[in-house]
Image (cartoon, rainbow, N blue to C red):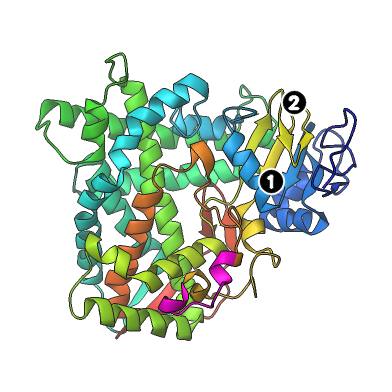
């Protein structure tokens, strides 16, 4: 491979050091750039960009943007964040919800918060939460009966909300889950609308109905979090929940997180532990209902590993096919469907410099469905994630490049709740699928990109006892 000579930067139509070309994207309109086309259908928009090439220029509003599709380059972006790429401003809607939490913090502030939050979600702590995850799933499944009609989205949302309020807040009342859950639903919808519409380029001070709605929703969330924090401080301090660990955490100077920081990190953990898992489970049931062969293989593993008992944390490693079902669901319907960073001085991609200020975008949705990395990319085939001894195809897993699957991001800013989310999804799937199959209605369900990837309608199903 040869390196391009001269001062040209990625964004001009020239090859990078590895020979891949930077090509122009679709023609935009004045001021808005490609925002109208992006806002109409972001998932299809990113797929069209991927089909143009691995480096595609476009405009997110008036600013320059670059779409990248190759796993190697995506890895460069993710691993260089905090050095030559900056965490971008994700807009007033996201900031209203997340504040200055670890997901949106930058530089020294991000490093401090990550060091304080990370111990709460280490594998040892996740193991302690696994019993709560399985217990909540058993209780939920125990209320179902053969032939019952359910809304899968509503059921999975209620279940993961209950797990979240127990493991994060240490409380156990439906009111807590319902109040926060309704507010989160509003916030997520408004974030999606703001991000893909004209609000994405409006100054923060411009009032809009959507911004008013998200402020009202966040006020409910803030009130609930403040009430629970007060309950913790006035009561038993020796609790196993995440909030207690955050309240006890100290940085290298011995300082605790402030009340505002506790609020921001609690909301961030709630979204990571509830919204992403709920979305993943809905899409898993959708895919299993449309692929009876996979559902049968899943049931066979559960019968073999669990028999007539429910799973615990120690079963997680043995449920290889169940894990593969979750991984394949996250490939086809990644809860987090895009990542973005802003180039700083000295940024490069593919060996070529990137102009400072360029917004660089990658999309899990587009890369996870790229036929270059996956055989039959639109087919739901969990076996692609298995080793040959577990029923996979020889060499197939090794053929998938690093960062061709990155539903939790990667690099230094990889999602802190990755382990929590995977264990939660696998245990819930195992508890429910050991008892029932869910026959979803035949209508196709389309994904709607918001804060996470959500179905466009109610997900109705008939419960069938196994």
Q: On residue 356, which mark appears?
A: 2
Q: On residue 61, which mark appears?
A: none
Q: Residue at x 61, y 34 (%)?
A: 80
Q: On residue 73, which mark appears?
A: 1
Please say if the residues under marks 2 and 1 sit with CB atoms less than 8 Å apart: no
Q: Tell me the SS state at disc 1.
A: helix
Q: Nearer the viewer, residue 191 or 163?
A: 163
Residue 169 at what x, y percent from top left?
Answer: 24, 40
User: Per the image, is 363 magenta?
Assistant: no
The quarter of the rendered structure image containing the C terminus is bottom left
Q: Is residue 98 left or right of residue 420?
A: right
Query: Given this view, does label 2 or label 1 mark the residue nearer the observer?
Result: 1
460 shown above or below 336? below
Q: Which residue is farthest left?
A: 236
Image quadrant in which you'd find residue 231: top left
Image quadrant in which you'd find residue 3: top right
Q: Residue at x 36, y 48 (%)?
A: 273
- Tell me how many marks there are: 2
145 shown above or below 119? below
User: Per the image, is 389 magenta?
Assistant: yes
Residue 424 at what x, y percent from top left?
Answer: 32, 57
Q: Nearer the viewer, residue 367 or 461?
A: 367
| Residues drawn in magenta | 387-398
Would residue 131 be visible to someone looking at this image? Answer: yes
Q: Nearer the viewer, residue 453 or 70?
A: 70
Residue 444 at what x, y percent from top left?
Answer: 58, 74
Q: Residue at x 61, y 32 (%)?
A: 208
Image quadrant in which you'd find residue 241: top left
């Amino acid at each position: 491979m040869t390196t391009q000579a001269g001062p040209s930067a990625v964004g001009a139509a020239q090859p990078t050091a590895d020979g891949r070309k930077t090509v122009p994207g679709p023609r935009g309109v004045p001021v808005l750039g490609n925002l109208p086309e992006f806002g109409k259908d972001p998932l299809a928009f990113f797929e069209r960009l991927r089909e143009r090439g691995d480096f595609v220029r476009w405009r997110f509003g008036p600013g320059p943007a670059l779409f990248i599709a190759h796993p190697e380059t995506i890895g460069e972006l993710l691993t260089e964040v905090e050095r030559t790429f900056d965490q971008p401003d994700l807009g007033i809607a996201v900031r209203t919800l997340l504040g200055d939490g670890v997901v949106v913090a930058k530089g020294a502030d991000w490093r401090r918060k990550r060091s304080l939050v990370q111990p709460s979600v280490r594998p040892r702590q996740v193991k302690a939460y696994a019993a709560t995850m399985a217990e909540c799933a058993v209780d939920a499944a125990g209320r179902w009966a053969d032939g019952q009609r359910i809304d899968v989205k509503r059921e999975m949302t209620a279940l993961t909300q209950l797990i979240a309020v127990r493991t994060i807040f240490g409380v156990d009342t439906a009111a807590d889950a319902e109040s926060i859950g309704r507010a989160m639903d509003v916030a997520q919808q408004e974030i999606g609308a703001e991000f893909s519409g004209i609000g994405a380029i409006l100054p923060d001070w411009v009032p809009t109905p959507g911004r008013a709605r998200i402020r009202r929703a966040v006020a409910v969330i803030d009130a609930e979090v403040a009430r629970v924090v007060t309950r913790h401080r006035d009561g038993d301090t020796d609790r196993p929940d995440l909030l207690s660990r955050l309240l006890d955490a100290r940085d290298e100077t011995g300082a605790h997180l402030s009340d505002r920081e506790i609020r921001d990190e609690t909301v961030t953990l709630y979204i990571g532990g509830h919204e992403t898992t709920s979305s993943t489970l809905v899409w898993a049931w959708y895919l299993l209902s449309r692929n009876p062969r996979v559902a049968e293989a899943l049931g066979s593993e559960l019968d073999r590993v669990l028999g007539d008992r429910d799973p615990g944390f120690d079963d997680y490693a043995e449920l290889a096919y169940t894990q593969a079902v979750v991984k394949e669901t996250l490939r086809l319907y990644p809860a987090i469907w895009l990542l973005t960073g802003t180039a700083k001085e000295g940024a490069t991609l593919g060996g070529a410099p990137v102009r400072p200020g360029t917004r660089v975008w990658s999309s899990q949705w587009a890369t996870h469905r790229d036929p270059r990395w996956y055989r039959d990319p639109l087919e739901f085939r969990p076996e692609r994630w298995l080793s040959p001894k577990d029923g996979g195809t020889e060499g197939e897993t090794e053929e998938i490049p690093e960062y061709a699957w990155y539903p939790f991001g990667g690099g230094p800013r990889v999602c802190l709740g990755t382990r929590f989310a995977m264990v939660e999804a696998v245990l819930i799937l195992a508890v429910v699928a050991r008892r029932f199959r869910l026959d979803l209605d035949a209508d196709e369900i389309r994904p709607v990109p918001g804060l996470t990837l959500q179905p466009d309608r109610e997900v109705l199903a008939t419960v069938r006892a196994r």
